[in-house]
Amino acid sequence: MKGSVIYHSRYGNCKQIANAIFEGLKESGQDVTLADVGTLSALPKDLEFVVVGSPTRAGHASGPIRKFLKKVDGPPLKFAAFGTALAKWLPKGDATAAEGISKILKEKGFIEIVPPLRSGVAGRKGPLAEGELEKAKAFGKAVAAELASDRASAPPAAAPPAAAPQGDGAKPAE
């Protein structure tokens, strides 16, 4: 399937996560591109899925991602969301960019195929917490597996119309 990993990164942490997700998707055979949201004015029209991510700012996605998603229109796509946040917040269940992105895309009718990925950073500017790049690559592979299983389980082509009833259509005698 054709897709794109779209991200915003202020200090480079989210970019690293996006790259690892991209690698996981590529290694799994997906036709995917990687794009910084600042280089896009709209979603490319030929996509079948997107993976969107951002750093967390005050519990929300970054401004550039929110502005971009506000403009997104067209047919709903399959999607996955990811975000970076302080590692110490993640176990507490605090809101992150990943959940915010997921909510925005669901409201636009997009179809979430896996739960959002919440990646931890050790400090406000980074670095990434230990194991996060491996987790992101595995996330990319999980997205690819879900896309493959979804494609494999797609409904079959429409069945031919049912044959017309035989006979003259009159009720049998009782």
Image (cartoon, rainbow, N blue to C red):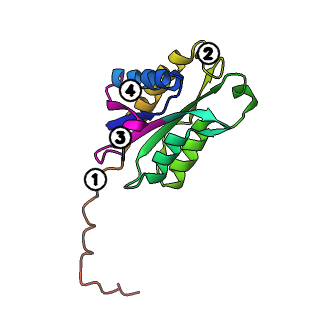
Q: Looking at the picture, which amino acid does disc 1 mark? A: Ala
For marks 1 and 3, the one nearer the N-term is: 3
| Neighbourhood count class around disc 1 (C-alpha, 10 Å): few under 14, some 14–19, many 20 upward | few
> Do the residues bearing badges 1 and 4 touch, measured as CB atoms within 8 Å?
no
Residue segment shown in magenta: 28-52
Which residue was labeled with disc 2? 129
Q: Nearer the viewer, mark 1 or mark 4?
A: 4
| Neighbourhood count class around disc 4 (C-alpha, 10 Å): few under 14, some 14–19, many 20 upward | many
How far from the left and from the top, in percent, is residue 108? 49, 55
Residue sitting at x 31%, y 44%: 44
User: Residues under labels 2 and 1: Cα distance?
Assistant: 47 Å
How far from the left and from the top, in percent, is residue 161? 26, 66
Does residue 38 show up magenta in the picture? yes
Q: Looking at the picture, which amino acid does disc 4 mark? A: Leu
Q: Which mark is residue 25?
A: 4
Within the image, what quadrant is residue 37 found in? top left
- Image position of 124 (left or right of 7): right
User: Residues under labels 1 and 4: Cα distance?
Assistant: 28 Å
Q: Which mark is residue 151?
A: 3
How far from the left and from the top, in percent, is residue 49? 38, 41
Quadrant housing the N terminus: top left
Does residue 66 show up magenta in the picture? no
> Do the residues bearing badges 4 and 3 touch, measured as CB atoms within 8 Å?
no
Q: Which mark is residue 157?
A: 1
Tell me the element at label 3.
helix
Within the image, what quadrant is residue 119 found in? top right
How far from the left and from the top, in percent, is residue 115? 56, 36
Tell me the element at label 4.
helix
Q: Looking at the picture, which amino acid does disc 3 mark? A: Arg
Name the one closer to the observer, 83 or 171: 83
> Do the residues bearing badges 3 and 2 touch, measured as CB atoms within 8 Å?
no
